[in-house]
Amino acid sequence: MIYNNKKHSLRRQEVLEAALTCFTEHGYANTTIDMIRKHSGASVGSMYHHFRNKEEIAGELFILGMNDHNERLIGVLQKTSSAEDGVKSVVFCLVNWIAEHPDWTRFILHTNSQIVKGESTKQLEEINKAFRKSIRNWFQPHIQSGEITCLPTELYPPLIIGPSMSYARSWLSGKSKTPITEYGEHLATAAWKAVKQTN
């Protein structure tokens, strides 16, 4: 399963699983809520008891994916102490999450612009705000100590995870055949070199 959340009923999880499969096979735009319902085996009544429409399903699926990755990354960072280990951990966490959840990643990448403008916008903004704060709190001491180069805040994500995301898109589309995890060490090393303080 893409996730195991005790706060959600088994039927709700089955619908989300079915939705991800449908979005992967048919694309977000071409998928209908009835297609998701049939694939999940839910009755019409059960389906609409849990979700009002396809957009709500997509929004929850998107947010669950973001939370799953973000929570894992924060947990990993809390176990690191050095700046180098932290920066590399960000990359390894992302690379491993993508490798474990390729369809979920494709969905997030392909529907990002639609979700951020949809019904889930406010909730997503709150999630991103809390996540950025957690990341900033970890990075700030290392920047102040001079281990990490002091740069405009918006430059850190493209420098640290930009190359990984670029390769992920190529790999997920089938253009690149080598699994992203095989390049994890190279991507992590490149990320550290991009932000470490040089004398």
Image (cartoon, rainbow, N blue to C red):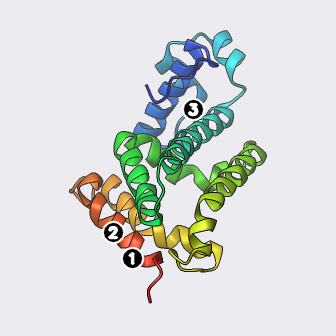
Q: CA distance from mark 2 to mark 3?
A: 43 Å
Q: Quadrant of the C terminus?
A: bottom left
- Classify mark 2: residues with Cα within 10 Å, few (<14), some (14-19) or many (20+): some
Residue at 62% in and 40% down: 63
Q: Quadrant of the N terminus?
A: top left
**Residue to which mark 1 is pinned:** 193
**Residue to which mark 2 is pinned:** 189
Residue 197, percent from left and from top: 48, 81
Residue 104, percent from left and from top: 46, 41
Which of the numbered marks, if any, corresponds to residue 32? Answer: 3
- Classify mark 1: residues with Cα within 10 Å, few (<14), some (14-19) or many (20+): some
Residue at the farthest bottom position = 199
Q: Front-most of 181 and 148?
A: 148
> Does the CB distance between marks 1 and 2 fall below 8 Å?
yes
Check the image and report above or below for 143 versus 69: below
> Does the CB distance between marks 2 and 3 fall below 8 Å?
no
Residue at 41% in and 60% down: 85
- Classify mark 3: residues with Cα within 10 Å, few (<14), some (14-19) or many (20+): some
Of the image marks 1 and 3, the number of the one nearer the N terminus: 3
Residue type of the residue flagged with mark 2: Thr
Residue at 73% in and 43% down: 120
Q: CA distance from mark 1 to mark 3?
A: 46 Å
Q: CA distance from mark 1 to mark 2?
A: 6 Å
| Image depth: mark 2 or mark 3 in front | 2
Residue type of the residue flagged with mark 1: Lys
Q: Front-most of 105 and 119?
A: 105
